[in-house]
Amino acid sequence: MKQLEQKILEEGIVLNENVLKVDSFLNHQVDPQLMFSMGQAFAAFFEGKGITKVITLESSGIAPAVMTALQMNVPLLFARKRKSLTLKDDLYTEKIYSFTKQEESEVTVSRKFLEAKDRVLIIDDFLANGDAALGLARIAEQAGASVAGIGIVIEKAFQPGRNKLIELGYLVHSLARVASLTGGKVTFAPDLSGADSSN
């Protein structure tokens, strides 16, 4: 997605060879117009997959996921990372390791919002080692739901996440694929889908 790649080049900050900071438009301050365009791109790619629900992790996945759900006219469900007084019982629970934060979180989804009849689209902001997407897929599978696909805003193509997900049989679509962050410079990898190359 050219619009997203341009935004990364203009505003992304390379912290080191593994970490790209995009807090000016994605995971602290949010660019709503860009999120809307990303929602359109995800909805177009996954059209016809019978998706009944979009699922993501709080909090950085919520903005692109809600725009995707809006375009698809389905609910958005986000897994919560923190314990809540109102969300204590009857939960699907999974442990997820965050590459960026270097910590493990226990994430939860209420059983009343995810059912065996659901076909879910997982949306996540970054794909590095694939742990977040896999954790959400495991939550869907606990419910007996099927995973129709996994949409990623920014994939770090030099890390093993995509291959791990593909090997497990998941359909993965990334809007921007970063080949390298070496020397403080963002280099993009080719789009693998061909579906959004005109964006």
Image (cartoon, rainbow, N blue to C red):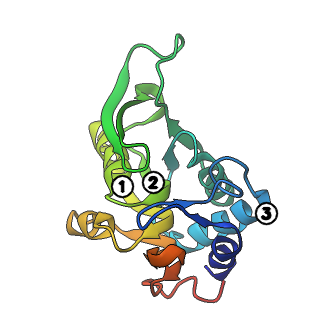
Q: Is residue 47 visible?
A: yes
Q: What label sits on residue 41 in the rendered view?
A: none
Classify 185 as above or below 23: below
Q: Residue at x 47, y 60 (%)?
A: 19
Three-letter residue code for mark 1 = Val
- Residue at image coords 52%, 10%: 85
Is 72 placed above or below 2 here?
above
- Alpha carbons under labels 2 and 1: distance apart: 7 Å
Q: Amino acid at mark 2?
A: Ile
- x%, y% of residue 149? 40, 62
Nearer the observer, 98 or 149: 98
Asked whether the beta carbons under mark 2 and mark 1 sit within 8 Å of each other, the answer is yes
Q: Which numbered dot is residue 33?
A: 3
Q: Is residue 113 above or below residue 123?
A: above
Near-viewer residue (103 or 143): 103
Give the residue at mark 2: 122
Q: Secondary structure at mark 1?
A: strand
| Label 2 Cα crowd, 10 Å radius (few <14 / some 14-19 / many 20+) | many
Question: Which of pointers 1 and 3 lies earlier in the amino acid sequence?
Answer: 3
Mark 1 neighbour density, 10 Å: few (under 14) some (14–19) many (20 or more): many
Secondary structure, mark 3, is helix
Location of mark 1 (residue): 147
Residue 80: x %, y % from top left: 49, 31
Q: Horizontal and vertical percent for residue 132?
A: 38, 48
Q: Earlier in the sequence, mark 2 or mark 1?
A: 2
